[in-house]
Every structure is written in structure tokens, then in C-alpha cells.
Amino acid sequence: MKVLIIVPTYNEKENIARLIKAVLRQDDSLEMLIIDDNSPDGTGAIVEQIMADEPRIHIIKRAGKLGLGSAYVAGFKYALKNGYEYIMEMDADFSHNPDDIPKLLEAAQNSDLVIGSRYCDGINIINWPIERLLISYFASKYVRIITGMPVKDPTGGFKCFNRKVLEKIDLDNIRSEGYSFQIEMNYKAWMKGFKLKEVSIVFTERMDGHSKMSRKIVYEAAWMVWKLRLLALLKAL
């Protein structure tokens, strides 16, 4: 089983070395691709130092802060080109627990897209203010109502794709970022008839550094669901 875990980074020097160590100890078959958007804090240089002694680490260095969605698209293309069977998304800030990686991979043996879900078994989020929790929870319900997609956590960013899903999605036509990127990828996979499965995870607010959340990301996600619904009605997905 050839697995690639894609981790976009921007100013994650406090976390990246610990994260790499925590991920790689899960299984000898795991490899990581760090996509660094020219972090001013030297995150990319830390990764390159680790790469000197660890062949399972790879890096794509980009010219600047180009966004989460385009980072993952670049990673997906790298994974397809290099023959990986399973491709995972994961944040760099330990909000996603590396110990959950085996659980997602196990579920991926019988599903096409596995989503690490904060909401499929109650609400499993630690250290979020109540306002943010309510926005996220009801945004997820909003997405389900508008799109009809049977996913309780459509904006979650801890997930595992079978390569056949990415082969069927036109990656060059993905333009969204942040939460809307996650919604778009889930929806397109679902509309193409792939099997989606949610597995319960506990999401913990980042340990170090600063959140990348912004109002622009939230607004983009709100409009994205209507765009996807319209494209589906026009059979243009």
C-alpha cells in the first residue's frame, strides 16, 4: 500500500518537525509531501534538513502564499504522477491527530473517500470558542440542506482519497480555497458516484502558531454550495 500524506504549510516551524515524526511512526509505508508557500519563518528549510536523512519526506516549495486549495491540487497531481494508491489531507498544526491516520486508512479499504468527521458521533471539538463552534456546526447543516450531500462534516480537512477519485475529478477546474475547497471535492466525488464514509475524530484547536481562518474563507464557502448545486442541475460538474 503506497500512501502519501499531503500537508500544506505556511509559518509552521513550531509544529512541522514534531508532526513529521508523529506521522511517520504510524507505519513504515507512509510518506509525506510538504507543500510550503515560502514561509518567512523557515518552515521549508526545516523540512529540507529532515529530508536529508529521511527519504519518505518530500517537498514542493512555492513562490508565495497561494492558498490551501491550490496547494492540495499540486499535491494531488504529484501523488497521481508518482503512483500513490491513497492520498491523505492533513493540517500541520496538530488539530488532526496523527494517531487517527490508521483509522482513516482502514476505512479507505472499503470506501473511496474517507472523511475524518467532527460531527458524525456528536460534536468532537476541543478548545474552540462557542461562537466558532456554532458557526461551523450550522454551516455543515447548511451545506447538507443545499447540496443534499449525506456528509455531516463537509468542511473537514482530514481525509483520505483513493487515487481513482482524484483521477475522475478535473483538478485543473478546482478554483476554491479553504472550507469551500473541502466542500467542492466532497461534492464532486459524491456526484460521480464514489462511496463516501465518515469516521469520528476529535479535532483539537492548533497547539502553536496562528489560525489561517478568515471571513473571506467563510463567505466563499457559503456561496460555493449554491454554485455546486447549480452546476449539478446543469450537469456541468
Image (cartoon, rainbow, N blue to C red):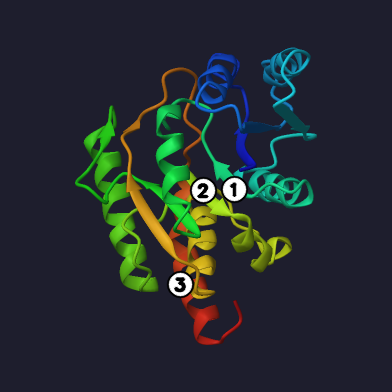
CA gap between label 3 and label 2 equals 25 Å
Q: Amino acid at mark 2?
A: Cys
Residue drawn at (43%, 32%) of the image: 96
Q: Label 2: how many residues lie within 10 Å, few (<14), some (14-19) or many (20+)?
A: many
**Element at badge 3?**
helix
CA gap between label 1 and label 2 equals 7 Å
Q: Earlier in the sequence, mark 3 or mark 2?
A: 2
Residue where numbered disc 1 is placed: 86
131 versus 232 height, above or below: above
210 versus 172 height, above or below: above
**Residue 168 or 223: which is nearer the viewer?**
168
Q: Amino acid at mark 1?
A: Tyr
Q: Amino acid at mark 3?
A: Trp
Residue where numbered disc 2 is placed: 160
Quadrant (top left, top right, bottom left, bottom right) of the C terminus:
bottom right
**Element at badge 1?**
strand
Q: Earlier in the sequence, mark 1 or mark 2?
A: 1
**Element at badge 2?**
strand
Q: Earlier in the sequence, mark 1 or mark 3?
A: 1
Please say if the residues under marks 1 and 2 sit with CB atoms less than 8 Å apart: yes
Callout in the foreground (1, 3): 1
Please say if the residues under marks 3 and 2 sit with CB atoms less than 8 Å apart: no
Q: Position of residue 104 (x, y in %)?
A: 43, 43
Callout in the foreground (1, 2): 1
- Left or right of 81 in this view: 193: left
